[in-house]
């Protein structure tokens, strides 16, 4: 974590990876890649991966990403900003001069959360029996989350819990996240 980057080890690893990729490309009679092109492929993949949730969240709310300004944060945000904006069809990028520290500051202010989930069964049908079983399992998951947070120094007064069920209609494969009521109904 507190060690310097090892440029030689990185170059050696990318050299080996490039050889492997180029052997595959040669078998397909395709042009070979340089080490820089292989490394840049990782950056392009990271950019596409960062675009996906931005596009999904924006479009899910009925907006077109291209009509907005991309605001970046984090230490590496400005390095990726133009490529991400281009991929999203955006023409403007906003980079606050404290973008790298604002990300860390925001994380420091954010609430701490502990999540746990487990599958409940492929073909469970809603009934008094399945509801009681789900309630017991939710209780166990809740207790486990509370125990983890207490082990990190939080007190009962600082904790709130929310319990959710991913439900679906029988015969469908789309789930709906539904908050479980406190009284078990």
Image: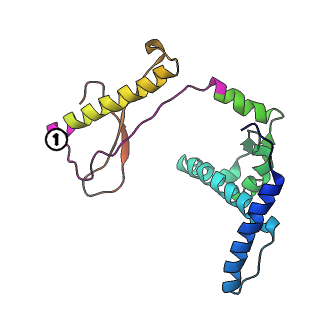
Q: In the rendered view, does 154 fall on the left or right side of 9?
A: left
Q: Quadrant of residue 111?
A: top right
Rendering coords of residue 59 (x, y %): 57, 51
Name the dominant secondary structure of the magenta segment. loop
- The residue under the point 34% across, 56% down is 173
- The residue under the point 43% across, 14% down is 156
- Vertical order, 85 against 3 (above or below): below
- Total count of labels: 1
Taking the magenta stretch, the answer to whether it contains residue 106 is no
- The residue under the point 69% across, 53% down is 66
Rendering coords of residue 30 (x, y %): 72, 83
Q: Nearer the viewer, residue 68 or 164?
A: 164
Q: Quadrant of residue 140?
A: top left
Q: Quadrant of residue 116?
A: top left
- Vertical order, 39 against 123 (above or below): below
Looking at the image, the residue that sits furthest to the left is: 128
Can you see residue 97? yes
How packed is label 1: few (under 14 Cα within 10 Å), some, or many (20 or more)? few
Magenta residues, start to end = 108-131
Rendering coords of residue 135 (x, y %): 26, 32
Looking at the image, the residue that sits furthest to the top is: 157
Looking at the image, the residue that sits furthest to the bottom is: 29
Rendering coords of residue 65 (x, y %): 66, 51
Q: Nearer the viewer, residue 97 or 100?
A: 100
Image quadrant in which the C terminus is located: top left
- Vertical order, 182 against 17 (above or below): above
Would you name the residue on which mark 1 appears?
127
Helix, strand or loop status at disc 1: loop
**Colouring scheme applied when the structure was drawn:** rainbow
Can you see residue 40? no
Image quadrant in which the N terminus is located: top right
């Amino acid at each position: 974590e507190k060690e310097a980057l090892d440029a030689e080890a990185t170059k050696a690893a990318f050299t080996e990876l490039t050889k492997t990729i180029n052997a595959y490309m040669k078998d397909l009679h395709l042009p070979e890649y340089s080490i820089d092109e292989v490394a840049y492929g990782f950056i392009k993949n990271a950019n596409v991966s960062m675009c996906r949730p931005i596009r999904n969240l924006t479009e899910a709310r009925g907006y077109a990403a291209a009509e907005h300004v991309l605001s970046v944060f984090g230490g590496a945000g400005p390095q990726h900003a133009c490529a991400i904006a281009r991929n999203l069809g955006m023409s403007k990028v906003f980079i606050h001069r404290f973008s790298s520290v604002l990300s860390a500051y925001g994380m420091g202010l954010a609430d701490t959360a502990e999540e746990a989930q487990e599958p409940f069964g492929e073909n469970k049908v809603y009934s008094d029996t399945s509801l009681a079983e789900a309630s017991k399992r939710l209780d166990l998951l809740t207790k486990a989350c509370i125990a983890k947070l207490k082990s990190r120094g939080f007190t009962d007064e600082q904790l709130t819990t929310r319990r959710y069920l991913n439900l679906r209609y029988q015969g469908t494969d789309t789930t709906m996240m539904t908050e479980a009521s406190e009284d078990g109904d």
